[in-house]
Image (cartoon, rainbow, N blue to C red):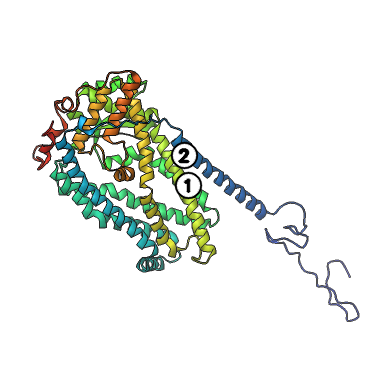
Amino acid sequence: MRPGRWRPPSPNEPCRATPRPARLIPPGVAGPDGGGSLSGGDAPSVATAASDRWRRWRAGGHVMAAAIVVGGVVGLLGGPSAPEVDDPVSAARWFDASFVGLAREYQVPRDVVAVVAVALRGGFALALAMSPPGRRVVGWIAARAGQRPWLTAVVVAGGAFLLIDVLLSPLAFWSGFVHAGDYGLRTQGVGGWLLDWVAFRAPTWVGAAVVAGLAYAVATRFPRGWPPLVAAGGAALLVGLVVAGPLVLEPLAYDTRPLEPGPARQAVQDVAAAGGVDVHKVLIADASKRTTRENAYISGLGATRRVVLFDTLVQARQPNTIRAVVAHELAHHQHRDILRGSLAAAAAVVVGVYALAAWLGARTRRGRQRAVSDPGAVGLVVGAVMLVSVLATPIEAAASRGMEAAADWRALQLLEEPGAFEQLQVQLARSNLNRPAPPVWRHVWWGTHPSPLERLAMAQRWRAMAGSPPAGPPRRAFVDEPKAACDTASPGHAPARRPARSAGA
């Protein structure tokens, strides 16, 4: 027989296999010799190489996530701190009894409303995650979304944050419009307040929907490798919002303009020169169209960094107290608090994503859900995220208080005028109706800044360390300043009860 020609086997010949064309072993499937190819050589298959690359990529992602967490912890704990203040000051030394009573009268109802809001928000999160009605609603949405878990996540997350805000809006309206108006702290009408409420809350609704949709899309596509992807993406998105916030989000709240030349501008330049800081942008926000409260803040990173002063503050205060405000904000810049806070928040995102991945993986292994990206479990995930965000409030407040205290101490060093700092704290407390010493539970849960008495005690500590004489005449010398905050209510919005604030001045 000529080679390559086939003939049927003869009955007298032993049975032999019919020659067949060589069959290539699919990539990733071991051949008879243990290799991934027909020849069985030592070269790895394409699929094996890809699998190795994927494992290396996942390992690199985990390392990057760990680096973000370490950076956040180091940034938060390794920053400047203020010295401990052991000797509290007396409220009676700085504030008259009538003001203390008025501040308490204003703040106590707001505290009650805030506690109710926290309870309702937490209860809503639990109901969404665990109650039969919550599961039925999520199941109904998932059934209509079909094989698109990301769409279920978009609808459930965006809808949940929207719904809870709508449910709590009567409390927000009473606290921010009715009650604030009774004490002369509001200058806008109902229409303006409602527009502001939507503008302030809408980014949360949209952000929750987008982030949840993207996270579920990634988890569906990469069921084993999604944690580092989602963690890195969430951290990058958060930092990006900090950078772009002054350009994208802040215009929703305020219209700003550059601080014009004059005493206030000169005060800013004096403090900047003392601290060796270049102040590129100092802006005035039109807060007076909403409130009589006074405030200032620093925002942005890099090219978007800016110091923003409320126009109510600039109009009501003299240059020495404006210098104290600017010194505090420039201290935040020197301490890189925006960057440190962003890194800490990014670290929290990474830890949260990995904790969520571990939890969902355990549920999947136990048969509680079909897969990590099971659309039926979206309500559980969104509810858990909402509940954790509520419970994390005291941690965020404590981190903020530490940064604010350190900025106060640095401001005292820049100013070397503890009297101006003390004057500012008294005037801000009076202007914003802040209690000199709020209850401990309230301060721990919501206090993002040291209390007025804590800040005044810090000034006293600085005096002692610097060898300065004790504070001069308290209280009255600080509230008789021209353009005092208690006289800044806009025409046509005379406060109903606010005049009592100056009774003991």
Q: Return the mark for residue 39.
A: none
Which amino acid, by three-letter code, is at mark 1? Val
Compare marks 1 and 2 and give the one earlier in the sequence: 2
| Residue type pointed to by label 2 | Gly
Quarter of the image where one finds residue 32:
bottom right
Residue visible at 29% across and 49% down in the picture: 201
**Residue 439: % across, % down:** 27, 43
Residue 94 position, x and y percent, is 21, 30
Residue 33: percent from left, percent from top: 78, 60
Determine the residue positioned at 52% across, 53% down.
226
Q: Label 1 vs label 2: CA separation?
A: 10 Å
Q: Is residue 163 visible?
A: yes
Quadrant showing the N terminus: bottom right
**Along the line of sight, which residue is nearer the eye, 390 or 226?**
390
User: Which residue was labeled with disc 2?
Assistant: 72
- Kindly tell me whether residue 296 is visible in this rendering: no
Give the labeled residue for mark 1. 350
Name which residue lies at 84% across and 77% down: 8
In the image, taking residue 68 as reference, residue 505 lies left or right, namely left
Q: How dense is the environment of label 2, judged by Cα within 10 Å: few (below 14), some, or many (20 and up)?
A: many
CA neighbours of label 1 inside 10 A, class few (<14), some (14 to 19), many (20+): many
Verify CB contact (< 8 Å) between mark 1 and mark 2: yes
- Of residues 101 and 72, the one nearer the viewer is 101
- The one nearer the camera, 301 or 71, is 71
